Amino acid sequence: MENFDVTIIGAGVVGLAIASELQGSNNLVIERHESFGKETSSRNSEVIHAGIYYPTGFLKAKLCVEGNRMMYEICGKNNIKHKKLGKIIVATNDDEAKDLEKLCKQGNDNGVPGLRLLDEKEAKIMEHNVVATAGLYSPSTGIFDTHGVMHYFEVKAKNSGCTFAYGCTLIAVEKIKSGYILKVIDSDGETYDFETKLLINCAGLNSDKVSAMVGLNGYTIHYCKGEYFKVSGGKSKYINHLVYPHPTDTSLGIHTVLDVQGDMKLGPNAFYVDSVDYNVDPNHGQEMYESAKKYIPFVDLNDLTPDMSGIRPKIQAAGEPVKDFIIRHEADKGFEGFINLIGIESPGLTSSPAIAKFVGKIVGG
């Protein structure tokens, strides 16, 4: 039976980053799709987040701040398209302005660099086409080519000797004394078994199912869908920064999404679903328009066309308070050598190199 030192389940951005960090010639990455990043990692706003929104002390805050710095460094050194545009979170009334003060304090407590509160005049100078009574400016927020970063991680891992098995679906896991036996169906439809000393669960939307295969049934992933609508008419030229509204309980709010090609989208909305479906409901364009016109009145309803959607693997169900990433070695539960990553939603993309470093310390420790 073939034997590997480390097997990573899932070739999203986090699985790729971990594979590149561990640098193992006898490591394996299993991915059920035909290539990397086919789910959450490529269906998002492509934003390098600063780390403002997440409760101080959460891994989400710590790893986002660290990942922000690391991601700019990776993009800069490897000619991956990116722009440090900066972001303005806008308030349109006094209550929202007070919340921005709280967000600023939380961001400062998290170690986010350069945050600055804006009054109405300052916000208007920075974004004269945006309606805001106040703002919070985050200079370290930006955008990047997520596919380029994932390709970089994959090449780095392959160069270290790591094997990638695409089109390969995990169907069973057995705990044994020396590690784990995995049963998979490969891209040719053949079933085979192999052994691994360490097993790292980076399965994203299916991470709870992989955990259950191993024998841990205490985790549940809730699907939270977000849709995006493309904005036509050259409206991306009307703003200079990423512009975000006051955040909601389930998302950062419907915001402007600028990409490295200079195109503009609005999104995402946020609603829980029972199954994975990436269709965009064109009727939700009205909702996008109504939310956005409060602070970007230059966007018209007929500018919007359905673009794409993504699904976040949330740990919290609808109405529950925000929960942190779960990144843990499950040895204390009787599963030595099994490292679980559950609920790696936003800011998982930004945090991915820092998550990889964190997991590397677990593996090495």
Image: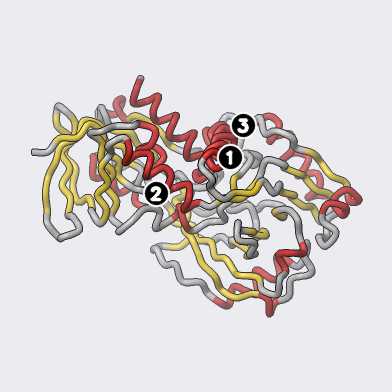
Q: Which residue is mark 2?
A: 12
Q: Position of residue 54 (x, y in %)?
A: 60, 39
Image quarter of residue 14: top left
Residue at the extreme right: 121
Q: Which residue position holds label 1?
A: 72
Are the residues at dot 1 and dot 3 in contact (C-beta closer than 8 Å)? no
Lateral position of residue 224 relative to residue 215, left or right: right
**Mark toward the viewer: 3 or 2:** 2
Q: Quadrant of residue 116?
A: top right
- Where residue 335 appears, as percent x and y from the top left, is 25, 30
Give the position of the N terminus as an image quadrant. top left
Along the viewing direction, whichever of 263 and 79 lies nearer the viewer = 79
Rendered residue at 71%/71% (across/down): 234
**Residue shown at 34%/26% (left/top)?**
363
Residue identified by numbered label 3: 56
Q: What amino acid does circle 2 point to?
A: Gly
N-term mark: 1 or 3: 3
Q: How many numbered marks, from 0 up?
A: 3
Of residue 308 and residue 71, the one placed in the foreground of this image is 71
Q: Is residue 283 left or right of residue 36?
A: right
- Relative to 139, is 261 above or below? below
Please tell me which residue lies in front, 341 or 22.
22
Cα separation between marks 3 and 2 = 26 Å
